[in-house]
Amino acid sequence: MKFPSGQRFLMIYSGVLTLVFAGTVLMGATSNARRATFDQITVHRINVVEPDGTLRMVISNAADSPGSFFHGREYSRPDRKVGGILFLNDEGTEDGGLLYGGHKDKNGKVSSFGHLSFDAYDQDQTVVIQNLDNTDGKSSYLEINDQPDWSEEALAKLDNKVRGFPKAQQDAAYHQFFKTHPRAKHRIYLGTDDDRSSELTLTDPDGRPRIVAKVGVDGKPVLQFLDADGKVTEQFPRASTH
């Protein structure tokens, strides 16, 4: 069946308009989906990723808390059952976190904590801000550490390998591991202890305390200088000889 040329033009024109309209609607729907607005959202976990899928941040409850990440690979962490935020670098490796929690058990014992940390590249925490309140006491502190150069992924692999082994076998494996993998060195500690004293400790590159400034629970201050063996070489005020 043939249509007059004018009618044929109208049909083509109508079809083009329909396609343009459909495309506009679809583009608008896509745009709205990419920029959705919510008044409230309830979730168990949120994974923030880059356009290529690289994980950059995890916001999670305790039940769905993530493991440890190294270069996009996740290693299980059964000990990490806490709510919080985990941050990852450009390569999908963990580089810090904000964790928190607390509860009172049926016997009235309180366990509460807050933790913010920043990690070295491929390693553990270099800066830690932490608050603890449990049966062992209360403490709040800032800690700065020197981390070694080896990748902590090696330790994550060992953790997953020996999990479930007898404790003696696990201890032996870790002992052997740390013979060739030096541990972190604590460099600065500033905080309060469970006896309500406050303390500032500065250490040398080997992690040995060299300067300690402390105010005891009795309110008395003391400043100590120590040698590499931990012996006090000078103290203010000087210790009483009586």
Image (cartoon, grey):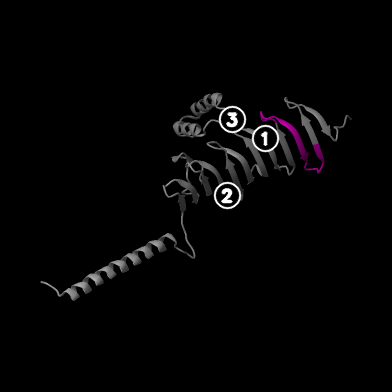
CB atoms at circles 3 and 2 under 8 Å apart?
no
* Residue underneath mark 2: 100
- Range of magenta residues: 204-222
Q: Mark 3 or mark 2: name the one nearer the start of the chain.
A: 2
The residue that mark 3 highlights is 183
Alpha carbon of mark 1 to alpha carbon of mark 3: how far?
Answer: 13 Å
Give me the residue at 51% from left, 42% from top.
Answer: 94
Asked if one can make out residue 134 in the rendered structure from this viewpoint, the answer is: no
- Asked if 227 appears above or below 39 in the picture, the reply is above
Tell me the kind of residue under disc 1: Arg
The residue sitting at 80% across, 36% down in the picture is 223
Q: Residues within 10 Å of mark 3 (few under 14, many from 20)?
A: few
Callout 1–callout 3 Cβ contact below 8 Å: no
Classify 10 Å Cα crowding around label 1: few (below 14), some (14-19), many (20 and above): many
Tag 1's secondary structure? strand
Magenta span includes 104: no
Estimate the x, y position of residue 89 in percent, counting from the top left. Answer: 51, 43
Taking depth in this image into account, of 82 and 35 the one nearest to the observer is 35
Q: CA distance from mark 3 to mark 2?
A: 26 Å
Image location of residue 144, percent across then percent down = 65, 39
218 drawn magenta: yes
Tag 2, which secondary structure?
A: strand
Horizontal and vertical percent position of residue 154 = 49, 31
Badge 2 crowding class, 10 Å Cα cut-off, few under 14, some 14 to 19, many 20 or more, is: some
Report if residue 13 is visible in the image.
Answer: yes
Q: Which residue is mark 1?
A: 187
Closer to the N terminus: mark 1 or mark 2?
2
Amino acid type, residue under disc 2 in the picture: Tyr
